[in-house]
Image (cartoon, rainbow, N blue to C red):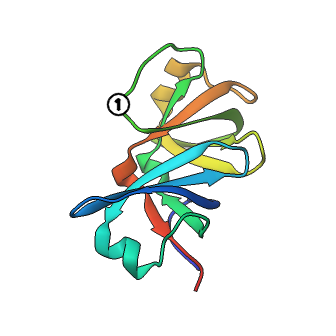
Amino acid sequence: MLTSARNELSGKVSAIETGAVNDEVEITLADGQKVVAVVTRSSTKALNLDVGTDAIALIKASWVILLPAASGLRLSARNQLTGKVAKIVPGAINTEVTVTLPAGGNIVATITNDSVGNLGLAPDAAVTAAFKASSVIVGVKA
């Protein structure tokens, strides 16, 4: 599967909460962290999603918000993955920040250059990568 999404997190469907129009699909990653996606009921059926199904959570880098792990902020964003900054690549306006998750794998965020300085981001800094459940696209291998 080829996509333009920078983030492809693999795991297994661990729960599905069925709704009339939308379903909430929980995917457990190798490190035990969970990603929740809100998808249409018809997508759940079309993808044959069930507990135990291998699935991929796709998240665009621009949809990911970073915050220092010890910030104490409470967010409404359902997905909050912890990790450490692995790489910072500054651009003219935005910076690409790669965060390594505990059991391997990465999540990439694109944030403004000013935000890197304001957050004090540096390699090995503990961070939380947050994104809304409605920003997750679920895929399966055919």
Which residue in the rendered view is the most extreme toward the left?
20
- Compared across the picture, whether 94 is left or right of 106 comes to left
Question: Which secondary structure lies at badge 1?
Answer: loop
Q: What's the residue at 53%, 60% (across, down)? A: 57
In this rendering, is residue 31 above or below 4? above
Q: Which quadrant is the C terminus positioned in?
A: bottom right
Q: Label 1: which residue?
A: 76
Q: What's the residue at 62%, 25% (across, down)? A: 121
Which x, y percent locates residue 59? 48, 56
Which x, y percent locates residue 11? 64, 59
Which x, y percent locates residue 96? 57, 45
Q: In which quadrant of the rendered view does residue 6 lie?
A: bottom right
In this rendering, is residue 11 above or below 119? below
Q: Nearer the viewer, residue 58 or 114?
A: 58
In this rendering, is residue 78 above or below 120? below
Q: What's the residue at 64%, 61% (across, down)? A: 10
Q: In which quadrant of the rendered view does residue 78 lie?
A: top left
Q: Nearer the viewer, residue 120 or 2?
A: 2
Q: How many marks?
A: 1
Badge 1: few (under 14), some or many (20 or more) residues near its Cα, within 10 Å? few
Q: Amino acid at mark 1?
A: Ser
Q: Which quadrant is the N terminus positioned in?
A: bottom right
